[in-house]
């Protein structure tokens, strides 16, 4: 494999988030969700457009029956079952701060286009959306075991567990995720308002 350096300047991240918070609320919510959950842009847009938190679902290949949105209020986070299975890049759970979930509720149903967001970022000299997943990965592996970070980011091809093991990883992810949010707030200085 070819190795390429991929430097990410934290000041660029802060500038991007501040710019979006002040000038484009919907894109700010999209970037927050990608950063907090390690989601791809396409998964984030799918989640926002199809947001249905009260829906009760059965997770395929498990014994789990749950509401699509489960919040852990004392810990300040929620997990939302995105449930993209057919795509080339499947995605199960989006882990997000409670504040971000509230923001998603405000814009749910919005049909946002990937190319338009990417063009907006280029036009204003912001970090490209795909960078959020990379920053999330680098920060997550400092806050939790790599297998849990892989699970949260739905990197299933990199996980080596049985299907029964996925249920155990869900519980472990619930335990470790608050540490990641703390890292975003502390080390990266990402404001969660």
Image (tube, rainbow, N blue to C red):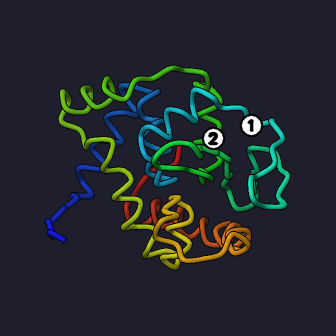
> Whole-percent x and y of residue 180?
52, 66
Query: Which residue shows up at 25% across the image and 32% down it?
Result: 121
> In which quarter of the view is residue 20 placed?
top left
Kindly identify which residue carries mark 2: 101
Residue 96 makes an appearance in the image: no
Number of other residues with Cα within 10 Å of mark 2, as a class: few under 14, some 14 to 19, many 20 or more: many
Number of other residues with Cα within 10 Å of mark 1, as a class: few under 14, some 14 to 19, many 20 or more: some
Query: Which residue shows up at 52% across the image and 48% down it?
Result: 192
Label 2: state its secondary structure: helix
> Whole-percent x and y of residue 49?
57, 26
Label 1: state its secondary structure: loop
For residue 165, above or below residue 154: below
> In which quarter of the view is residue 100 placed?
top right
The residue lying toward the viewer, choosing from 43 and 104, is 43
- For the residues bearing labels 1 and 2, Cβ distance under 8 angstroms: yes
**Number of marks in the rendered image:** 2
For residue 82, above or below residue 113: below
Q: Is residue 45 left or right of residue 1?
A: right
Residue 135 makes an appearance in the image: yes
> Whole-percent x and y of residue 51?
65, 32
Kindly identify which residue carries mark 1: 53
Quarter of the picture holding the N terminus = bottom left
For residue 45, above or below residue 75: above
Between disc 1 and disc 2, the foreground one is 1
Q: Is residue 42 left or right of residue 91?
A: left
Query: Which residue shows up at 76% across the image and 52% down it?
Result: 59
> Whole-percent x and y of residue 93?
62, 53
Cα distance between the residues tagged 1 and 2: 10 Å
Q: Earlier in the sequence, mark 1 or mark 2?
A: 1
Q: Is residue 19 left or right of residue 142?
A: left
Query: Which residue shows up at 42% across the image and 53% down it?
Result: 190
The residue lying toward the viewer, choosing from 7 and 97, is 7
């Amino acid at each position: 494999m070819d190795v390429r350096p991929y430097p990410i300047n934290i000041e660029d991240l802060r500038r991007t988030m501040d710019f979006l918070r002040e000038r484009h609320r919907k894109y700010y919510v999209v970037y927050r969700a990608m950063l907090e959950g390690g989601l791809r842009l396409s998964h984030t847009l799918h989640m926002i457009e199809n947001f249905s938190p009260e829906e009760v679902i059965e997770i395929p290949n498990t014994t789990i029956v749950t509401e699509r949105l489960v919040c852990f209020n004392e810990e300040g986070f929620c997990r939302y079952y995105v449930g993209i299975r057919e795509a080339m890049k499947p995605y199960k759970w989006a882990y997000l701060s409670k504040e971000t979930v509230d923001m998603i509720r405000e814009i749910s149903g919005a049909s946002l286009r990937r190319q338009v967001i990417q063009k907006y970022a280029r036009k204003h000299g912001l970090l490209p959306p795909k960078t959020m997943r990379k920053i999330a990965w680098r920060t997550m592996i400092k806050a939790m075991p790599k297998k849990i970070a892989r699970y949260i980011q739905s990197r299933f091809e990199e996980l080596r567990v049985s299907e029964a093991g996925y249920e155990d990883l869900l519980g472990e992810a619930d335990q470790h995720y608050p540490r990641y949010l703390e890292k975003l707030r502390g080390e990266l200085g990402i404001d969660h308002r």
